[in-house]
Amino acid sequence: MDDLHIRTASAADLDTVLALWKVAAKGTSISDDRGGVEGLLARDPEALILAVRGGEPVGTVIAGFDGWRCHLYRLAVHPDHRRRGVGSALLAAAEERFARLGGRRADAMVLDGNESAHHVWDAAGYARQPEWSRWVKPLHD
């Protein structure tokens, strides 16, 4: 794993990140486009964290902090690089970021049907909160 580098994403990474999500991420979001990711980086330039191996991004996590809560989104690792510590390294970087910002607890958005991801989050020490549901309203088409 010594050839794995963790860094924040820049605008130059956006097309590569979007392509990675198409092969590595389960489900899609209304924000999974260039404008959505540009908005994220404009609002919080350190929120999108990349795992890079051999000069190519092989994983991502969005570590968003709104001053109140720490939110994790888009933990995605390219299928060819899974089970090699990439996800763990990304989560460690996200948690370190949250600690620096004064965060107290992190939560993650995980699809109910993504069983393989459930195992990853469980192994990382996260627990499902069955008493909560997510309520969503698109703000535009």
Image (cartoon, rainbow, N blue to C red):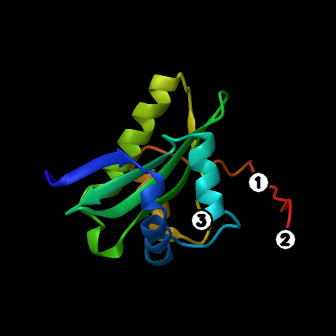
What residue is pinned by disc 1?
133
Query: Alpha-carbon distance for marks 3 and 2?
Result: 16 Å
The amino acid sitting under disc 2 is Asp
Whether residue 109 can be seen here? no
Look at discs 1 and 2 and give the one toward the viewer: 2
Residue 72 versus residue 30 in the image, above or below:
above
Q: Residue at x 15, y 55 (%)?
A: 3
How crowded pointer 3 is (Cα within 10 Å; few <14, some 14-19, many 20+) is rated as some
Q: Residue furthest left?
A: 2
Dividing the picture into quadrants, the one containing residue 87 is: bottom left
What residue is pinned by disc 3?
34
Q: Residue at x 61, y 49 (%)?
A: 40
Residue 34 versus residue 101 in the image, above or below:
below
Residue 98 versus residue 10 in the image, above or below:
above
For the residue labelled by badge 1, is the local secondary structure a helix, a strand or a loop?
loop
How crowded pointer 2 is (Cα within 10 Å; few <14, some 14-19, many 20+) is rated as few
What residue is pinned by disc 2?
141
Q: Quadrant of the N terminus?
A: bottom left
Look at discs 3 and 2 and give the one toward the viewer: 3
Q: Position of residue 57 (x, y in %)?
A: 33, 62
Look at discs 3 and 1 and give the one toward the viewer: 3
Query: Alpha-carbon distance for marks 3 and 1?
Result: 28 Å
The amino acid sitting under disc 3 is Arg
Question: Would residue 112 appear left or right of 101 to someone viewing this image?
Answer: right
Q: Position of residue 129 (x, y in %)?
A: 65, 47
Q: Residue at x 67, y 28 (%)?
A: 68
Dividing the picture into quadrants, the one containing residue 60 is: bottom left
Marks 3 and 1, the one that precedes in the sequence: 3
The amino acid sitting under disc 1 is Ser
